[in-house]
Amino acid sequence: MSTAFALCLMALFVLAAIGTPIALSMIVAAILYLGMKGQDLALAAEQLIQGLYDGFVLLAVPLFIVAAAIMNAGTISDRLLAFCVAVVGRFRGGLGHVNVAASLVFSGMSGSAVADAAGIGRIIIDMMTRDGRYAPGYAAALTAASATIGPIIPPSIPMVLYALVSGTSIGYLFLAGIIPGLIMAAVLMGMNAWLSRQRGTALDEPVPLSRLPGITFRALPALMMPVILLYGIYGGVTTPTEAAAVAAAYSLLLAGLVYRALSLKGLYDIFLASAKSSAAIGLIIGGALIFNYIVASENIPKAVEGALVGLDISPTLFLLLVNAVLLVLGCVLDATTLILVIIPLFLPTARALGIDLVHFGVVTVVNAMIGLITPPYGILLFVINATTGIPLRDMIREIWPFLFVLLLALLVMILAPDTVLWLPRMMGYKGV
């Protein structure tokens, strides 16, 4: 490691520690490195512009953001929530199960944990805390934990970013996320049921079964979004990026014409908020592209590969070590930085050890999502705190059981690759 790179890293972490946005931290650190190396500072702009313009797959990110924002508008959220309440609200800890089920349903539309937590999350927390049925800290913690499912079930913005840095198929990554997402939902529901019994939570009034067909029918057009998306990709009709455009168009037609839940003013606000979110993610991606150029020029991935392969470790032990490192880094770094900057360092070693990159991608993205609820950083905890006013200390006190079961689910995915790869293989994936 050169002195210039060491100072580059120091600048990155110091700037991030004092609250500078991570994208600007990476860009400033990269310019410092180029200056110390005597290279043309315009290289930073060149890497950013070329990376963004050459990355056709990145078009899927703003399109999924727009689709999620539109689907969160008006009566669409109400219809989907009513469907979740009717299906799982009748069991012990019913509204907690509704919380997880809603994240599972909305994950098929947003692809973003933050979008799920900020969109549907506040509505569910209000439902859970009404009349004192659930403690605010518990409702907020479960909402944050269930929002981590959003980027695992397709569509998934983090999976798109991983595909960008690894060159793996977005379609197979999307397929590979379905079973892990269901496992995460199952363990969260199991923990919610156990805690509800321990705390003596009262049963919620069930929705009569006679009303279930009507509620399902009203929610069916919205529930068809992930079906249309996956059919487009795996039926050979669209590329993943084109499927994102179809998803955005479908959500617009659904909200505007079918449900009539969208005004021109509302549409303008959605486009404005989506543009801001897309620009923020684009800056992070651009900063990561510049930083990855520096990492490559320093030959860091090859050095990591040589050191780890030289130790003659098994693929399973390598996966466990990488995930342990990511869990520690996830306490202080956001998921996008982990996926775009840290995970690429381990990709050459994963290839050398014969690890399937789709499996590697899913477990590392799940790991990064768990980092979103890991104190002290836990960005989802801050998002919910900002939208609801529930104190962070109350959420942190309640988050540990849900964090524990999500880590168990991650361990299952690492040790049993078939939980991740079975569905892609059923659809023709060869892999390793």
Image (tube, rainbow, N blue to C red):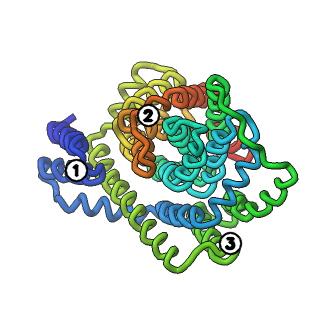
Crowd tier of the residue under label 2, counting other residues whose Cα lies within 10 Å: few below 14, some 14–19, many 20 or above: some
Label annotation for residue 259: 3
Question: Which amino acid does the dot numbered 2 rest on?
Answer: Asp
Residue tagged 1: 30
The residue positioned 62% from the left and 64% from the top of the image is 243
- Mark sitting earlier along the chain (1/3): 1
Which residue is most to the right? 210
Which of label 3 and label 2 is nearer to you?
2
The residue positioned 57% from the left and 66% from the top of the image is 73
Identify whether 66 is placed above or below 171: below
- Mark sitting earlier along the chain (3/2): 3
Question: Which amino acid does the dot numbered 3 rest on?
Answer: Tyr
Q: Circles 3 and 2: CB distance less than 8 Å?
A: no
Label annotation for residue 145: none
Q: Residue 358 vs residue 9: left or right?
A: right
Which of label 1 and label 3 is nearer to you?
3
